[in-house]
Image (tube, coloured by chain):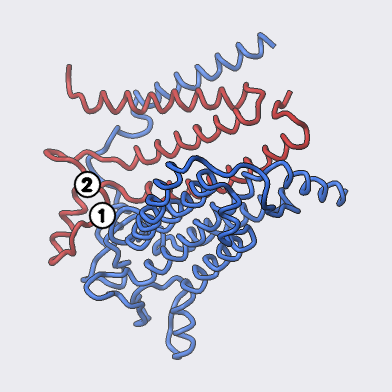
Amino acid sequence: MSDPVPFLFTVVLLSLVANIGISLYGVFTRPSLVKKFISLTIFSDTLNSFAIAIGFRRVIGSYPSAAVLSSLPREPGELSAFASAAVDPLPQALVLTAIVIGLAVFMFLAGLIAMYYRHYGTTRMV
Amino acid sequence: MRIREVVIAVSVALVVLLLAYVIEAGGLGPIAPRELRELAASYLVNAYNPWNVTQSALSLEAVTAIVWDYRGLDTFFETSVLFASIVGVSLVFRGYRERLGIGGRGLSEIVKTSTRVLLPLILIAGVSVALHGHLTPGGGFQGGSFIAVLLVLMSIVFSLDFVVERGLTSGRLLALRSVGLIGVLATSVALLAAGLALGVEAYIFQNVAREGSELSMPQWLLDRPTGGTLIFFNMFEALAVAAGLALAFLVLSLREEEVREALGVGEWYE
């Protein structure tokens, strides 16, 4: 057994990929709108986890820190030390935006599905 | 039907396999790189950098600095999308009005008492997550979601009538939502308005002093950094998200009698 970190990373990424496959299968084949909706939320969550994973990094000899300064820096050297150990904050910020917009879309979809059910008495598409 | 399902299953499996090969062959770059991209390093160094204020957001948390300062316009439109979605939900359920005296009266007395203890704690946790968005992980959206849980919990444990009797009707929540969005808008142009009034240069979404403009929002509250505009953005975003999510939940959890009324209005329009 060689270095376990790349192996664990591959396992996590592959399970995310498998999750994408399963959720897309649910979106395409389930006839019920509610199940399509649930699959779509799983799909979006998986993609967001993917983006976060891309922002991750390895720090030799220690663990990567969150992109938050835990105390007020007193000299510029502390900032470069922070930047050499922290993870990439940009994917996190983009995922935050994506989550909010996803929530907006899903909220509207949930309203539409509820109204569809009231009108037709079913959520089946076919 | 059989063949179609087999084709779909095989193609999904192929997608999974191809993506797996792409990752194995290094097509997505090395897994967990050791070095950061230059952009990320620049964000990390400049998020709180009192020695280079014109490029800094003066926020201890880099994610909040990106969300509300470096990419502030982006986030403003994101908040607008959330607002548009809530308007869309209200449109789909047009004609909906809360009615008292129908449906259940909530859960048992034990659950109600323990929830009464829990509610203020949730409120405090939400407000602290929102107001410390520039110091600790969190921010306006996360804090607002915390606070929206209050209404969900109240309407399940105490019944929807309890919520409506306390004045949390959909109209008022929509008004609160609009106040939050207007607050975000006002904060984003506050320094521009001050610059116009004083006759000096300023920018939209300006936080602290920038190149060519000395104007700055207050950077310290007692002995804590406020991150300039970030604390206001987080505050108003928390208000907007809490009211918006609560409104969406209220409208989505409507009951049969109210639906019949809403549907009647829809048919009347047709």
Indicate left or right for B260 with B60 as reference: right
Residue at figure coordinates x 48%, y 89% from the top left = B197
Q: Residues within 10 Å of mark 1 (few under 14, many from 20)?
A: many
Amino acid, disc 1: Val
- From mark 1 to mark 2, how far is it between C-alphas? 8 Å
B208 or B210: which is nearer to us?
B208
Amino acid, disc 2: Ser
The secondary element bearing badge 2 is classed as: loop
- Position of residue A17 measured from the top left corner of the image (x, y, whole percent): 43, 26
Quarter of the N terminus of chain B within the rendering:
top right
Q: In the rendered image, is residue B81 in sight?
A: no
| Disc 2: host chain | A
Question: What chain is the red one?
Answer: A
- Position of residue A86 measured from the top left corner of the image (x, y, whole percent): 23, 48
Question: What chain is the blue one?
Answer: B
| Residue that carries the numbered disc 1 in the rendered image | A68
Look at the numbered discs 1 and 2 and tell me whether their residues touch, using CB distance below 8 Å: yes
B62 in relation to B232, above or below:
above
| Disc 1: host chain | A
What number of labels is visible?
2
Indicate left or right for A33 with A99 as reference: right
| Residue that carries the numbered disc 2 in the rendered image | A65
The secondary element bearing badge 1 is classed as: loop
Residue at figure coordinates x 58%, y 42% from the top left = A106
